[in-house]
Image (cartoon, rainbow, N blue to C red):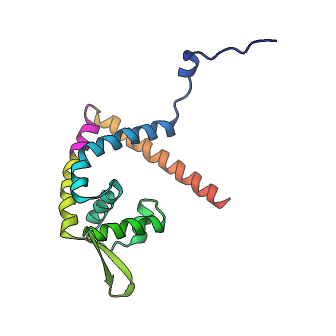
Amino acid sequence: MEKKKKTGPDECCRAERQIGYDVRTLNQVIGRLVNSYQSKVDEKAGINRMQGWIIGYLYRHSEEAVFQKDLEAEFQMARSTASGILQAMEKKGLITREPIPRDARLKRLVLTEKGMEFQMEIMENFDRIQKVLKSDIPQEKLECFLEVLDMIRENAQRECCLRDEN
């Protein structure tokens, strides 16, 4: 009987890098970086990272009518998840839901003054984080990375849509 050849470290290292694993690892590292900057702001506001992203989205779209369904689509979350997050944000005084004239059932999401104050602090922190992430990376390599990132996202989304159809 022939013994199986053991795989040594050289064979393991020759394996193709896995995009999903690398993206997940990068996400975790960036998440820790964000947490290190944001923990004081988040603690002060009593918010989590997703609530911070929602505050940012509402700030960037403050001239538009933004509804819960818009957040569900933007952040790829279920209606129940979005509803729970928004209810918590209302209780903390970060957002209000305002009826719109054409349909009283629809409630526009609006940042409160308190929500705006936290957005300003969040933006300052994200500017710092962005500088850290981009440091020592030539602009042309950064642009290439972002283009490839968009392509990977499109491939994954297309495949998800195809699988959902089957």
- Occupied quadrant, residue 23: top left
Q: Position of residue 159 (x, y in %)?
A: 59, 51
Give the dominant element type of the magenta stretch: helix, strand or loop.
Answer: helix
Residue 165 in percent (x, y) is at 65, 61
Instruction: Report if residue 130 lies within the magenta region.
Output: yes
Asked whether 84 or 97 is in front, the reply is 84
Q: Is residue 6 above or below residue 161?
A: above
Residue 77, above or below 24: below
Is any part of residue 49 visible from this angle?
Answer: yes
Q: Quadrant of the N terminus?
A: top right
Using the image as rendered, state which of residue 78 and residue 135 is in the foreground.
78
Question: As drawn, which residue projects farthest toward the top?
Answer: 2
The residue at the point 33 percent across, 41 percent down is: 32
Relative placement, left or right, of 128 versus 142 is left
- Which region of the structure is painted magenta? 128-136
Q: Residue at x 51, y 30 (%)?
A: 17
Q: Is residue 13 magenta?
A: no
Give the quarter of the figure containing the C terminus: bottom right
Name the residue at 21% across, 56% down.
44
Which residue is found at the position 29% from the left and 33% from the top? 137
Q: Is residue 32 above or below residue 98?
A: above
